Amino acid sequence: MVNSVVVEKIAVNDPLTDLKQKAIIDHIIDENLSRPGATMVILNELQASIGYVSTEMQEYVAKRLQVPVSRVHGVISFYSFFTTTPRGKHTVKFCMGTACYVGGTPALIEKAKQIFGIEPGNTTPDGNITIEICRCVGACSQAPVIVVDEEVTGRMKPNKLPQVLKSIQTVTE
């Protein structure tokens, strides 16, 4: 299939404007186009390969699959593991399940905001760290819990947070 799909407005930094990334996107779509559940398979692979699925990428996928954009966006917005903006090299997630919330997650979030200078849902200006809020991670007995990249750390206290995060912080001097 010739990849002659045109997306109206593409942000300058979108993966569709980078030839290498666009080739990856096209390869993923081409490889999975006729598979059952192609939309989910393609979006999963794009998330894994590119790191996020931008609005422009959603439109591009929809046009290539010949489905409404609303179908693609519906999948992206339903599943919390999809993101529409680039994430940092590292991700710090704060569990807001009931046990963690009661156990002190709000104080942990405040401490992280002080350390990184950003709000949850944002990435540090150097692109190194994204902080996020998530729902129960299933470690309620260790509340409050944070997840740094894929590592769960429980019984977290605000005064312990800087030491735990030290290994992922970029040294700038």
Image (spheres, rainbow, N blue to C red):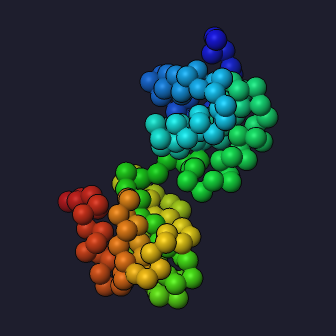
Q: Which residue is situated farthest in the top direction here?
A: 2
**Residue drawn at point x = 66 percent, y = 23 percent:** 34
Residue drawn at the location 54% of the way across and 67% of the way down? 134
Does residue 108 appear anywhere in the picture?
Answer: no
Residue drawn at 47 percent across, 88 percent down = 103
Residue 45 lies left or right of residue 114; in this view the side is right
Of the pair 116 and 157, the residue shown nearer to us: 157
Residue 161, placed above or below residue 37: below
The image shows residue 41, relative to residue 88, as above or below, that is above
Indicate the quadrant containing the C terminus: top left, top right, bottom left or bottom right.
Answer: bottom left
Percent coordinates x, y for residue 95 in the rendering: 50, 73
Camera-side residue: 92 or 78?
78
Q: Is 113 displayed left or right of 30 in the figure?
A: left
Left or right placement of residue 156 versus residue 134 in this view = left
Choose between 81 and 3: the one closer to the eye: 81
Q: Quadrant of the N terminus?
A: top right
Q: In the image, is 102 to the left or to the right of 167?
A: right
Looking at the image, is 87 positioned above or below residue 12?
Answer: below
Q: Is residue 26 above or below residue 83?
A: above
Q: Residue at x 48, y 26 (%)?
A: 24
Quadrant in which residue 12 is drawn: top right
- Figure label count: 0
Residue 8 in the image, given as x and y percentages of width and height: 71, 28
Q: Position of residue 136 (x, y in %)?
A: 54, 72
> Does residue 38 appear anywhere in the picture?
yes
